[in-house]
Image (tube, helix red, strand yellow):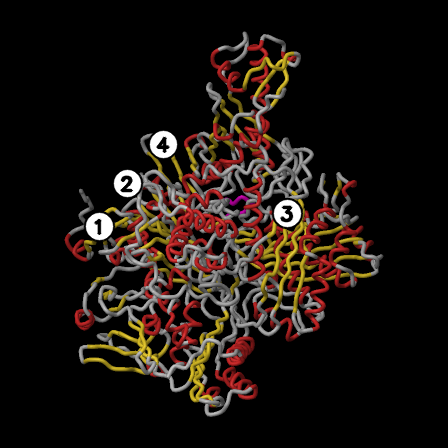
Amino acid sequence: MSQALDEIKIGGLGASRKRVEDNRFIRGKGNYTDDITLPGMLHMEILRSPLAHARIKSIDASRAWEIPGVRLVLTGEMMATRNLAWMPTLSYDTQAVLATDKVRFQGQEVACVIADDPYIAKDACEAIDVDYEPLPVIVNPVQALADGAPVIRDDKENQAGNVIYDWEVGDAAGTEAAFAQADVISKLQLHYPRSHPSPIECCGSIADFNRATSKLTVYMTTQAPHIIRAAVALVAELPEHMIRIISPDIGGGFGNKVPVYPGYVCSILASILLERPVKWIEDKSGNLISTHFARDVYLDGEMALRRDGKILAVRMHTDADHGAFFSDAQPSKFKIGLLHSAFAAYDIPVAHLTARGTYSNKAPGGVAYRCSFRVTEAMFFQERMMQAAADDLGMDQAAFRRMNFVRDEDFPHRTPFGFLTDSGQYAKCLDVGLKAVGYEGFRKQQEEARAKGRLLGLGISTMTEPLGAGNSREYDILGIKMFDSAELKVHMTGKAIVRTGARGQGQGHETTWAQIVSHELGIPAEDIVVEEGDTDTAPFGMGTYASRSTPVAGAAVSMVSRKIRAKARRLAAHLLEVSEEDIEWELGRFYVRSAPDRGVTIQECAMAAYSNMPDGMEPGLENTAYYDPPNLTWPFAVYIVTVEVDPETGVWDVLNTVAVDDCGIRINPMIVEGQIMGGLAEAYAMANMQFITFDADGNCIGSNYMDYMLPTAWETPGFELHSEVVTPCPHHPIGAKGIGECATVGGPAAFVNAVMDALSGTGVRNIDMPLLPDRVWEAITKCRDVSGAPPVRTDD
Amino acid sequence: MTVVYEDHGDEATSDIPVRRIKFTINGQKMIAEVEPRLLLAHLIRRGLGLTGTHMGCDTTNCGACTVLVDGRPVKSCTMLAVQVDGREVGTVEGLATASELHPLQEGFKEEHGLQCGFCTPGMMMAAKALLDENPEPSEEDVRWALSGNLCRCTGYQNIVKSVLWAADKLRAVPARGDDPPEPPAHSPARGDTPAARPASPTNTGQEG
Amino acid sequence: MYPSRFRYEAPHSLDEAISLLRDGGDYAKVLAGGQSLVPLMKLRFASPELIVDINNVPGLDYHRADPDGTLHVGALCRHADMERSALLKTAQPTMAAAAPLIADPIVRSRGTLVGSLCHADPQGDWASVVLALGGSVVAQGPGGRRTIPLADFVLGPFESVLEPDEIAVEAVIPAPKGVRSGGYLKLERRVGDFATVGVAVALEISGETVSRAGIALTGVGGSTIAATAATDALTGKPLSAETIEQAAGLAADAARPRTDHRGSAEYKRHMVSTFVRRILSRPAETAERAA
């Protein structure tokens, strides 16, 4: 009779285990960067540029130095003498740490003050006089590419204009030929506006250089501590083994906490110069105006269609506005991230994408905010084009998508841009979603309402995501391959500690990694502690972003657990005095195949590893695994939203939001649902109210929470989640695919498509996000598209 | 108590006005000497070392810093420390008793009402103010009461469930542990009717 | 996020507060709720030299009606108190409609109506409400008290007529002659946002006719706008679809909105007329005979 443990009871896969992290957070005992105090710690504040583009004529910090309590004032000039005024970025560009010649975006770091107290540091910042000479401003790619446009990056040799890259993928000639055969060509131009991840906790660091030991320790809000260690070694020219990056609890990341920011560099230099810990915690305005934003990509898309609805080809051109520096963290081979994953779920024979990136007088970034390396853009463009194409064909939105899906039996499938998808049940997900939302009934209701002048709408969006970057053949950041790791140590009493190269910021790794170990080894999850974030103790990894942790670090956890289990099997054979071939495993226990009652628990094997090893075996039960994923995983989702639009005000309310997510095996269903709901809220936010824009002078609108609109619990709709469809990943050790960003990737188009559906009949093809009431009203009343691209329209 | 600070010369130090205040924090009486410009949130975090109250913005929007002052919810970033002279301050660290978590804390864990945890203390304090005033809130009541607190991780749905879980538990178990129930020393808000809400989420007067 | 230095006093009487202001120097500010002043100080848009905190002055946290229906709102009456007030719900529909829309629930537990009027933010909601109701501010100084109609109270953005040594102690809403009705509608992107457009409508109906009307607009000009032409079109006649439409159009004409990231001037004018029409077209469900 089986003596296998109950996997759910011990907290293995599929258990909605309550979170370990919660124990400290609900008590207010989290350990975020700003919670940490070190003896002798000083405080740093940054002075930022009020202008978007200006030459710096002079900086006079003499009054600042006079203020009691001020220890150090750093300017670009001082940084330059140490070769630190500029630093390399993760995209092979350079970025100013503190401005020297010019400021290139409003909010750019110009100087910083280190003082006994942040209040004093702020007083001193106010006492620094900077003389600026304004220069013409660029806030969008059209301006950047215009003849005679000012060159923003005149600091770079060989930079003639404002173009960063021109990139393409796909088959230009084949696409052209397909378009020539088309019955219908559907076109769409739109702007995915600049947004900002804006976790509630801002960025910050405490740099602590110890002169006695020559070791630099930096506590930092970072999603990728090992990348930071390498970057600091490079930039500060300190030996890598003498740098320790500790990422404590992080109050939300969403990609905002991956890059290296000037504040970190300044705090490190200040600590080295002053030989005291230096804390820099930015304020929300600093975070919004200067740290990595998201999106800001323009689409010019075309779809070649056969009359019956079959998509023959897709052609896309994108213009990405990267801001003043190209500093994205993304796989180096792909200039526009994984935007070419667009249309991966649809069976399209041929496609062509051209992508251009330009500089502008705005903060640097682009790849952030649960984007999975621009898959948010890919899927938003895709589903907006699908919507327009179905309209152009006069076809039902659901039927159009369904007929073009890759079919279940056609995997593995090579997408027109070269990705290989391996699994999915797309049509089934759509069926579940349509049933849940009551599709047929809604269409009837919609018609009846329209007769009475009420505008109801339904929007569908699908997405599949290349998660788990990525295989070493194709994926690297600055040449460093994107594997990840897990180290597992099983102690003699059968308790364990697992450390990985990931770094969660709320995803629940402390809870879920233990569940994977529990699944593989039968050790109860509560007997396993998880640690991440300290580069001195964690095995090397590339951090947590782009939903890569479950696919890569999670896989590593599984693999290292299997290595441990393999050794435990040998120990079991030794304890049971049989050969290894006679040993079987069930959850928590090895037993003799011919005499199943004779067995040993995993805990007994652990003790044996320290006290009763067979001859020739190394003692101990500890190991490490580094996982180079064979492919990306491909979760799939269908999101369906219904809305009612008030034609008189342009205000729209969400009636229903249905999400059908197939992310393969769910380690912890409760946590998976939490990720989906968080993503849907962000999707709603972007569709409804949230964006950053600029006026013609480059003033950033959306640089504080009075202007950058995050929805509250009052506006945010409720969500109906479905988990019926489970297609395990064929290559992932536990069949999981990852989920963190799916709803942010697929969600926005569902909301937008719903509003556009409510407006069908007005001839309006596109309203740029966010679909603010004034834009919707303008579209309805004037029967025209509404763009939201900067500069914002003003009266002046 | 010992205070040590650098001597920058007589001129500088005479400039800085410092005020002595007496207040209660989570039931404990304290004295502090603070500059008037010190924000209450900084007194709590740095002066008292109670770092559970977080700072998330600089424009009084996010609510991560929400505490209770005389039982009423306040964004501690928008109150001066000197203003709590003679008052009672309650923070997240005061929610649990020596032996038990507060039902709100339990509810947030049970219903997965937190992910990164940064907004959570503020949410719980705002929720406590709600439940002190209205022990049987509807989902809408909860969403309305928390509309001054921002979260980026959860999408709010589980936060609402967490608060409703706590409300259920508080109604079922009125006395917690050994402490007899006491009416709050100061009523959460003065008024004879429940807090009003607009009729619809977007309040534009649209007739349904 | 760190205010610059200032001196601070917390008097226990109005007289003490007034003396402190009188002796206090060039730039002193009264602190009540602090939900407008402290944020400005944190951004260093305001750097007063002296803060006079009146939160310890007793007897200011009231709101009450005289027998004739005159409403008095004390300087320390919080938005949250207004939000929960049975008195407002039965007798002051415009105020009751606006109270829950001020900022967010946490800010409402500290902020005050009187403080909001003194702050004179062109995007302040209470100013429109009090203006539409024909209300006044009662100020107290070394020379005694004076009552200033709100229409005369605001000089410009963030500037009131209060003398440096005067404190606003009360807002007064005059007694109604007829049955009150009205409302406040606010277009905001989310809770806590400033109004893109806000409209306060306050009517009094005596018999069949509108005996008094007030319409004031938030967020569509450099200051709160009293739409007097619109109210003229309503007063002295029965309320009808025609007069409502006239008033809606005239109120839109009175607006002076700017085109910006919150919308075009045209849209904002349209929202003014839409809000006026919606408020006026509602059945008067909460109004009761006040006199």
The residue tagged 1 is B32
Rendering coords of residue A697 (x, y %): 49, 66
Mark 4 or mark 3: which comes first in sequence?
Answer: 4
Q: Residue at x 72, y 50 (%)?
A: A431
Circle 4 or circle 3, nearest the eye: 3
- Farthest residue to the left: give it: B10
- Looking at the rendering, in which quadrant would you find the N terminus of chain B? top left
Q: CA distance from mark 4 to mark 1?
A: 38 Å
Which three-letter amino acid code belongs to the residue tagged 3? His
| Residue type (three-letter) at the residue carrying disc 1 | Ala
Q: Is residue C79 left or right of residue A670?
A: left
At x 61%, y 9%, the residue is: A578
Q: Does label 1 lie on the same chain as label 2?
A: no
Q: Nearer the viewer, residue A273 or C68?
A: C68
The mark nearer the N terminus, 2 or 4, is: 2
Q: Residues within 10 Å of mark 2 (few under 14, many from 20)?
A: few
* Residue A357 percent location from the top left of the image: 61, 54
Is there a contact, CB below 8 Å, between mark 4 and mark 3?
A: no
Q: Secondary structure at mark 1?
A: strand
Q: Which mark is residue A214?
A: 4
The amino acid type, in three-letter code, at marker 2 is: Gly
Chain at tag 4: A
Comparing A466 with A41, the one in front is: A466
Give the residues drawn in magenta, as a range.
A87-94
Instruction: Say if the magenta span includes residue A90.
Output: yes
Q: Which of A317 and B131 lies nearest the eye of the viewer?
A: B131
Q: CA distance from mark 4 to mark 3?
A: 54 Å
Q: Is residue A514 above or below residue C78?
A: above
Q: Which residue is mark 3?
A: A722
